[in-house]
Image (cartoon, helix red, strand yellow):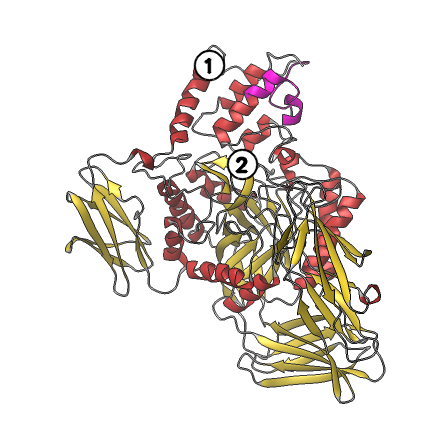
Amino acid sequence: MRNLYSLNQGWTLSFPKGERETETVNLPHTWNAVDGMDGNGSYLRTTAVYTRTFKAPTQPLAGGRLYVEIPAAALKATVRINGKDAVTHEGGYSCFRADITDLCVAGDNEISIEVSNEDTPTMYPASADFTFYGGLYRGVNLISVPETHFDLDYYGGPGIMVTPKPTEDGGADFAVQAFVTNAGDDFTVQYILEDPYGWEIAGAVRPSDNTAVTLHVPEAVLWSMDEPNLYTVTARLNRRNETYDEIILNAGVRSFAVTPDGGFSINGVATPLRGVSRHQDRLYKGNALTAEDHYEDAQIIKDLGANTIRLAHYQHSQDFYDACDQLGFAVWAEIPFISVFKPGDAAHEHCRQEMKELVIQNYNHPSIMFWGISNEILIGGISQELVDRHHDLQKLVKELDPTRLTTIAHVSHTPTEGPMHHITDLESYNHYFGWYGGKIEDNGPWLDKFHAEHPDICLGVSEYGCEGIVNWHSSNPQRKDYSEEYQTLYHEHMAQVFEDRPWVWATHVWNMFDFGCAARNEGGVGGRNNKGLVTIDRKTRKESFYLYQAYWYKEPMVHIVGRRYAQRAGETIEVKVYSNQDEVTLFLNGKEIGKQQAHRIFRFEVALQPGFNTLMAITEDARDCITLEKVEKEPASYVLPEFTEHVEGVANWFQQVGSLDLDAPMEFPEGYYNVNDSLDELSHNEEAFAIVTKAVKLTTNFSIEPGVGMWDMLKKMSPKVMCEMMPDSTLGDKFLNSINAQLIKIKK
């Protein structure tokens, strides 16, 4: 029989380049758990070596084989047994294995795994807006199997494919095929199918060299996000009266479709997908999470009321996919073909490998319905090669899995007309109108215009969001103040935009949780992207979390907004209440002050009494209570100092360029810099680059420096493209003119 042994304890971690001292660690582990999010602006990208000894387990059957299984090693790994190479793998997010039987000896064996999170010429991701944590962050296993066993060698897959399909008579067909290594005449594969209640309802036996069969089930119990009913499929590799190997997995029966006007439907029921994106790291754990961590993340998302998750921007843990199967989410799973395109056959072959691993390893998960081809890949520009590579990936996915739909996440400035459309089955855009630039109110009209001009494209929004820091508060929230109040204002608008447009097939908040990005330093928090609805330590659910609960959660809920904005000044204040109920009554210090009927957001004008005040909101089936203090003046600590600097910076910028004619048409004199030059080109001139870095900091709050942070991702962009990507209405239409007017005075 197959036996799995954990090798997670007692590893020695050494750094051949000497960056850190040798230490003893247990798995899962990353060496960037702290520096990947500590705000120092960089983190250790190097090669490290994990080493330990083990005794090869005894297989009772002659000819047995021993495999090492690495669920993920970031980003490149070479496994050696007793000093001899067993396997090298590029790609930091997928499972790989190696047969190490012939490399092992009796007694103690040494396993060393050399892991690197450095960039390579061919590997994705190259550069992106998140930390590339290095390490063996999903553990290491040994798998002992008989000589004849279910396949362990094909792209890290499980050795079995199960394809359930509803039938017109209300039943379902389960197409099942297992893959046997060293199949023999006296081996058979037995399939056992159990319903969601544990009853055995179907079965079949096939010869080991011809295992495909279809099992029919009458009166099938369907899987959906509201009712994630799971069947259990068992495959047993038998020889005479003995089971040599066994695989057990869950499967779900569902059908789904997406149309441009109708949006998403599951099992024939129209169901707009409304949910979040998720990164896999946690505070000072990095990406080295336990199974319990993954399940808790999925449960928090379920508590939000979301029905879909975009798992960005790479293959996630099997533990999380399992949780999605069990709790009920429509999952978008994707590869890290992101931000920076690497030309050439070798890089594309790596991309194909990552796609094969993603699909083959995760084919059986009923929660997965969409395969993501790429994300924001036009940041560095477009080429015919890039377009061709996308067509090839689309073809590959359809060959691997014709049962699911493909999709793509376009960067915001991707032209609405052009060759990047009509490649995948579905399309989505990453838009941040109302945060990086533009106005919140730009979102709905943009969607309507695209939908009218492209009635044949199924359109979604794969990213949208804004930073929210729970320290910062304002009664007059504004873009770039990083206040929790502006984040709620933004999401209040977006939630209604999407509720009014059920034809938008899926929307995914960026992001469910704050996550590590060593290159960032904004909002007073370094090393993080703080757009999450929940903090990176999972301790605090921001006010925006409850806004989406009001829109999506099915159980009665009510939530008074502003408990961290605890000290308030003014004769009256606005108190907002979120609820999925139709009517809310608000009490101040035990006295009813108002009753309202509204849709999701209830607004009350309240005159607080001096000192401490108790506010209680009550609906028919839920209640919430908070305490606020009335003060003469609100604490200065509620305001981000950088926000004042930003406002002053805007005024100073135009004051400094006041002598320029910003109404004149833009000119591009030959031999001089202009806004069409890339950041890389501009960086070769100190004066020109100083203008551009100041403009970028003013509009995005990003600091750019050659070779640092997200430089590789941004260096091919021009100021013009950046302004198109993040149009800044607060600076006016003349902002790009003002940059160009300064640059064309500088000779190349």
Question: What percent of the width, then of the height, locates residue 678?
Answer: 64, 26
Q: Quadrant of residue 291?
A: bottom right
Is disc 1 surrounded by few (<14), some (14 to 19) or many (20+) residues within 10 Å? few
Mark in front: 1 vs 2: 2
Residue 74 appears in view: no
Question: What percent of the width, then of the height, locates residue 218?
Answer: 59, 83
Question: Which quadrant is home to the N terminus?
Answer: bottom right
Residue 303 appears in view: yes
The reply, left or right, for residue 63 in relation to residue 682 is: right
Question: Which quadrant is home to the C terminus?
Answer: top right
- Whether the residues at callouts 1 and 2 have beta carbons within 8 Å, the answer is no
Q: Secondary structure at mark 1?
A: helix
Residues 576 and 498: in front is 576
**Label 1: which residue?**
656
**Label 2: which residue?**
40
Give the CA separation, mark 1 to mark 2.
Answer: 32 Å
Residue range of the region highlighted in magenta in the rendering: 671-691
Furthest toward the bottom, the residue is: 241
Residues 679 and 638: in front is 638
Q: Amino acid at mark 2?
A: Asn
Which residue lies at the image location 74% right of the left edge and 54% below the top edge? 353
Furthest toward the top, the residue is: 659
Question: What percent of the width, then of the height, locates residue 617?
Answer: 24, 56
Residue 395 in magenta stretch: no
Residues 364 and 60: in front is 60
Q: Amino acid at mark 1?
A: Gln
